[in-house]
Amino acid sequence: MNHCGCGRIVARCVSLLPLVAAACMPATKAAEAPAVPPPYQANFTYKSPPTGQPVDVTLGILDPQFGEDASLYSKQSNPIVKNMLSSLDASVGELLVAKGFKTTGPYASLNDMTFPEKKAADLVLYPQVNFKAEVIYGPPHAAPPSAATEKKGTNLLEGLPFITPKNDAKPGTPGTATPQVCDAKLSVSGSVVFVVAEPESGAKMMNKVLKVDEADQTFAAQPCPGPGNTEWTREVNDAWAKAHEVLFQSSMKALDSYVNAEELQGFKSQSKELRDKKAY
């Protein structure tokens, strides 16, 4: 028997084992790209713990009213703005009920209340919005080498107040040597005024102001707005959502601290005096 020949065969079989094992192993998956986080979801909820103490004051609740500077802002179709204003409207009534007040409404405005509705309410309360938020774009300029020129938008700009740069340069036209971008600025300024008034005459009993000015936020090398681009980048869209969350939360916290049962009971007495004088 040729033992040497058998030895060579065994050695050859042993040397093939790693290859066979490798062929039987499942193919390794390519590394997956990290998941892109969803857009920032602003928190437009505010809860005030119930006091458990009823207050003998009936408040007519009006929708947020808008000053002249905020009228255009209030008519935006932007979903974040609409959501914030709707939540502010609902949360004011919820806060007052939690504090023990009886409420009616909400009503679109004082003029939309009928005479019986005004008679049934001791006072009316509403937030008057005098602030505006806007994204302002600067003139187009050459994109720096490090700029991320392929940023994708996440939120349509339709109905939003932005200033289109007054510049003859048109990004993307033939002959443009380098890609054109615009620097953007998010600006928030103004105030929210919480008003308590006598329903029939509209005479104001309380007029407390909350300033809502915020430091401007700047975003370099953004896609310029125009017919071919109606979207914000993720960073601008998220900053817009966070700014409105701050507006909502700070407004509700201020109202929570302003509303005082004893003070409003005093306003109720003053309101009754005004009505009695008007009757004469």
Image (cartoon, grey):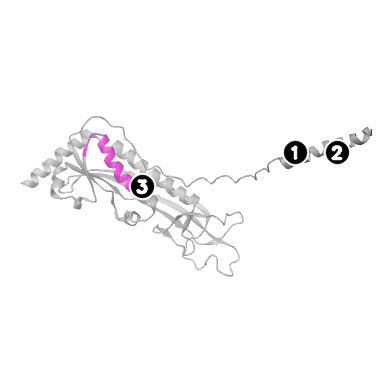
Query: What residue is disc 1 on?
Result: 21
Amino acid at pointer 2 = Arg
Whole-percent x, y for residue 52 in the image? 25, 29
At mark 3, the secondary structure is: helix
Is residue 15 at least partly visible in the picture?
yes
Number of the front mark, 3 or 1:
1
Three-letter amino acid code at the position of disc 1: Ala
Q: CA distance from mark 3 to mark 2?
A: 75 Å
Neighbour tally class for label 1: few under 14, some 14-19, many 20 plus, Cα within 10 Å: few
Q: Nearer the viewer, residue 171 or 168?
A: 171
Is the residue 135 above or below the residue 119 in the image? below
Q: Which residue is mark 2?
A: 12
**Magenta span:** 85-102
Would residue 60 be counted in the magenta stretch?
Answer: no
Q: Residue furthest bottom?
A: 174
Residue 54 percent across, percent down from the top left: 21, 32
Q: Residue furthest top?
A: 52
Name above or below for residue 75 compared with residue 275: below
Classified by dominant secondary structure, the portion drawn in magenta counts as helix
Q: Which mark is residue 144?
A: none
Q: Amino acid at mark 3?
A: Met
Q: Earlier in the sequence, mark 3 or mark 1?
A: 1
Label 3 vs label 2, nearer the camera: 2
- Distance, label 2 to label 1, CA atoms, is 15 Å
Which picture quadrant has residue 149?
Answer: bottom right
Label 2: element kind:
helix
- Tell me the quarter of the picture where residue 10 sits: top right
Q: Nearer the viewer, residue 171 or 263?
A: 171
